[in-house]
Amino acid sequence: MLRHIIESQQFNVPFIMELFESAQRMEKIFHRGGTQDYSNKIMASLFYEPSTRTRFSFETAMYRLGGKVISTENAKEFSSAISGESIEDTIKVLNHFVDVVVIRHNEIGGAKRAAQVSKIPIINAGDGKGGQHPTQALTDLYTIYREIKTIDGLNIALVGDLAHGRTIRSLAYLLSKFERVKIFFVAPDALQIHQDICEHLEENDIWYTKENSIHKIINQVDVVYQTRIEKEKLNSSDNEYSNLMKEFYIDRNVINHLKQNAIIMHPLPRLNEISSEVDNDPRAAYFRQAQNGIFVRMALLAYLLDRY
Ligand code: CP
C-alpha cells in the first residue's frame, strides 16, 4: 500500500494496471460531470514552481471527485517560505488543515522531505531540475496503454533535454518494469541521459541506445516522446542552436517516416520542437495526453484518500 507518491520506483506492474482500470472508470465519471464521493475531503496544492497542466489537472481532478481545493501557485513568494519557513514546518501545519497535499518543489528531494514529516498523503508534482515527476510518468504510460493497448515490446524514443527532464527520468523508471521494451535516448551529447538511469536499465535488462538525431530512428519507433531543448542549457549561439535543433525537430516531413500506428507525445509546454502543423495528425497524442492527466490524478487521489 502506498501512502505517498514520490518517485516512479515505488510502483509495480499490478499497482499500475489497477490504477489504469481506475483511471478508465474516472474517465466515465468525469464525462458525466463528476461525483460527490469525496465531498468531505480537502486538497492543498502547494506549488513553489510554475505549472499549468499539473496544478490545473490536480485541482480539476479533486473538484470532479467532489472535493475542495486550497491552493498557492507561487509558494516561494506567497507562502511563509518567503520568511524562511522550512518545508517541514509548512507540511506539519497543513497536516492539521487538509487531507492530501500536492507539492511541486524547486529542490530535488523536496517532496520526499515533505513526506518524511507527514501523516497525510504527499504527492510529488515535480521536484527540482532533474528530480522526478511521477504523476506525469503515470499519465504518459496511461496514454501509451490507452492508444497502443500494450507497453510490452514497444520501441520508445525519448527525445530532448534528457539530462534535466524529470518527466523523462520518471518515465524511464516506469518503462523498466515492462517486458522487451527498447528505449532510444535521442539528445545532444551535453543533454544526454544520466548514468544512473542507464545503470538502472542495465540492472533490469532493458535494451537502450543513445542517438544524436531523430532522423536515424524515426521509422523504428512506436512512440516518440519529445521534450524541450532550451538554448540556455546548451550555451550556444542562435545559429548553433537552430542548426542543432534540425536533428530533433518534428514536422510534417519527419512524421512522413513514422509508422502509421505510432504516437507522438510531449509533456508540454512545447517551445519550438514540434511544428504546429503536426497537431492535426491523428498520431499527435500530446493534447489527449494532457487530458489523461485528469483521469490518472482522479484515480491517484481516490486511491490515497480511500486508504490513509
Ligand atoms: N507537464 C507538466 O508538468 O506541465 P506543467 O509544468 O504545466 O505542470
Image (cartoon, rainbow, N blue to C red):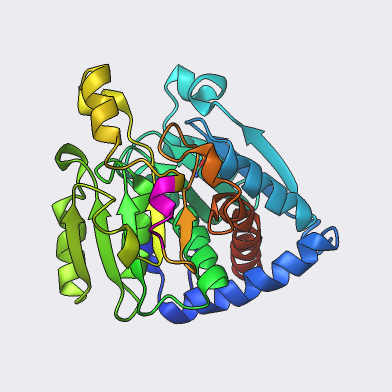
Query: In the figure, 242 relative to 145: above or below?
Result: above
| Residue 195: quadrant of the picture | bottom left
| Residue 109: quadrant of the picture | top left
The range drawn in magenta is 253-258
Question: Is residue 215 covered in magenta?
Answer: no
Nearest to the observer: residue 164 or residue 228: 228
Tell me residue 302's x, y (percent).
Answer: 66, 65
Question: Is residue 254 covered in magenta?
Answer: yes
Tell me residue 291's x, y (percent).
Answer: 64, 53
Nearest to the observer: residue 75 or residue 113: 75
Residue 218 seen in this snapshot: yes
Determine the residue positioned at 58% across, 36% down: 52
Query: In the figure, 171 relative to 82: above or below?
Result: below
Tell me residue 237's x, y (percent).
Answer: 22, 17
Q: Judge left or right: residue 66 versus residue 87.
A: right
Query: In the figure, 233 relative to 102: above or below?
Result: above
Determine the residue positioned at 69% across, 38% down: 70
Q: How many numbered discs?
A: 0
Q: Judge left or right: residue 157 versus residue 41.
A: left
